[in-house]
Amino acid sequence: MILIEDRLQAAEAHRLEGRSENALLLYQSVLDINPANIEAIKGVAEIQLAQGNVAEALALAAKAVALSNCDLAALALLAQAAQLTGDAVREAAALDQAALLDPFEPVTIKLRAGLAARNGDLVTAEKILVDALAVHPQEIGLIAALSQVYMEAGLVGEALELSQKALALKPQQPDTLMLAGTQLAALGEHSQALGLFEQAFLLEPGNVLLMACLADCHAGLGQLSEAHRIAQRVIGLRPDFLPGWRVFSRVMILRGEAAIGLRDLATACRQHPDRIEALIALADGYRAAGEHRQALALLDPLANRLAGLPAQQRQSVIALLRDCRLSLGLIEEAGALTADVRLGQPDSTFGLPNNEQEAVAAIGSGAVAQAFAALPVIIGPAVPILEALPLLRFCTGGGDRRRQITGPAGFADLVDLVPGTVFAIAEDDDPQTQTAGIPLAAVLALPADVRGGIELPEPYIEAPQERRAIWQGTFADLPRPLVAIAWNGSRPGLLLDDLRPALDGFSGTLVSVAWDDSRHQLAFMPDILDAGVHFGGLSDLAGVLAEIDAIIGPDGVALHMAGAMGRPGAVLVQPNAAWYWHAKDEFALWYPSIRVLRTGKVGHWSAVLDDVRQGLVDFLAALPASGAAVPKAEDGALRQPTDPQTRCEVA
């Protein structure tokens, strides 16, 4: 007779190699002999959990814990299954019991930190993991978990450093490859992320979450056919897998088939057991398609009961509500979502959980205005520059007062162009970052008469006079109108070649303000003058924008800078454009000098550009022409600026 120990050993080997059916047969043969064998029960629970049979896994894990409440693996299984079923009480109880048995056991430490993070307590999650890493410094799971906590907290550099450390320790582990790939994809580095996802896929081809990440990454690179193929495979393998449906709908939207993608996503959401998660997924799908009112209609019932939602779901709903409201120009309603604006000492808060006006009345508008004027504005590490740019209008100084702005070093060049401000780099160990301040995004929560209006009477970014003078001399003899042009570096963005048909017949001068790798697209349009090759920083971009007659291009730093400087321009966007391109009478609410040319639907730019081509042609034709034409260099290169410091070659 085959010994129980031999059956268990063979079953575990089958399970680890992914042969679940063989493992189940062997575990069951053990349970036929001894129904109370805890190792077999745990093995079956592991398989049921991996296959998504959460209720069965929960029952088996509970049975294992009942047989031995000192078994850490059984407690971890119970906590995992309880989390997936939404039983927070049982999850916490299992983890508390595990912590009493071994406070630094890696598996349960990850689960405890994950519970704290889901509850919005990232500080506790960090402490749990840091303390455990002091005992297990090379434990991959703990390093990866801490990396995820830092990423969620917006500490991107620290998160990437840890994920790279995990990769160095175990370069062929699918989980660590996925972690690093997911972080890079979140930062828009899809090319690098794709390589990591592909390595992980070769190691674990049946992982549907990995496949969904792979499809999403292909979509981010504009490789929609491959993204569609993989996304279809995911939902075919797991029709109940909501992340797969979310990726599938996104791919369909980018393919210009939003109606089909949203219809299928809605069907999947109606069948999903977690109604809140399904509602969030469907609302996000409508937001991705540019249907913000429909997304709000889905989310509004949740807006009045945010406090009762789990922390992660609450944050997802708030982010979606804020984005949709801003995209519809509902500024005050979006600002009221900010729950905590620090306007005093670090332990005092200016709460806006429900009704902004009541909160202001309780403190007093005068006190709020005084605090706002005195405290620094803090740009968090997770704030994108394109989100920060429209909000910096509220941060200018007045008279002799200089507003302090604290943030990552990458914002220094930008803030230097905002009059009346002084910039301080935020360092993790800098006591300055621990003092009271106003998060930049939270400024919207302040009353309009305190923060200032959206449509400011004057620009809030200024080009340095010495840079402006250099570019003024450079452009002096060129034919007008002088139009700056920008584009995206890769698909699914708007490429320079997409703009070519609308530029035929333009009689002025086109000046490129691209100063990254996207400059290589100029090789196909040599008549465009390459100003970007001479840029040494944002001050040169501002200097160029101050001297041109207009700018055209998609969403990007150049269009934002032009709008903040009050320069004329036309931005080309699709219906799912970011909130700061909400239009009022065809001009951007946040940047009234910029005309918004919006396509009729979301899709590949080559397929939807006809929607805005005539508008762009009319915009260019309406620009005043003046100045005499001068001969161009044979290669179309721009005359060298007189200041050698402005030259900055781009690889």
Image (cartoon, grey):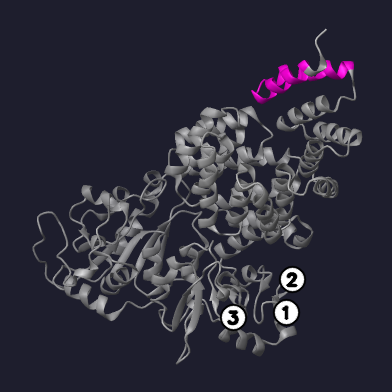
- How far apart, in angstroms, are the residues tagged by discs 3 and 2? 17 Å
Q: Does residue 589 show up?
A: no
Dot 1: few (<14), some (14–19), or many (≥20) neighbours within 10 Å?
some
- Asked if the residues shown at circle 3 and circle 2 are in contact, with their CB atoms under 8 angstroms apart, the answer is no
Q: Is residue 566 above or below residue 102?
A: below
Residue 326: which disc?
A: none
Is residue 545 highlighted in magenta? no
Check disc 3 and report the residue beneath it: 448
Residue 354: which disc?
A: 2
Give percent across and percent down for residue 122.
67, 59
Give percent across and percent down for residue 490.
37, 47
Q: Is residue 442 above or below residue 421?
A: above
Dot 3: few (<14), some (14–19), or many (≥20) neighbours within 10 Å?
few
The kind of residue tagged 2 is Asn
First-in-chain label (3 vs 2): 2
Is residue 7 highlighted in magenta? yes
- How far apart, in angstroms, are the residues tagged by discs 3 and 1? 14 Å
- How far apart, in angstroms, are the residues tagged by discs 2 and 1? 8 Å
State which quadrant residue 372 falls in.
bottom right
- Asked if the residues shown at circle 2 and circle 1 are in contact, with their CB atoms under 8 angstroms apart, the answer is yes
Residue at 15% across, 73% down? 627
Horizontal side, residue 637 vs residue 549: left or right: left
- Asked if the residues shown at circle 3 and circle 1 are in contact, with their CB atoms under 8 angstroms apart, the answer is no
Per the picture, the main secondary structure of the magenta-coloured stretch is helix
First-in-chain label (2 vs 1): 2
First-in-chain label (3 vs 1): 1
Give percent across and percent down for residue 416.
39, 76
Check disc 1 and report the residue beneath it: 359
Magenta segment range?
6-33
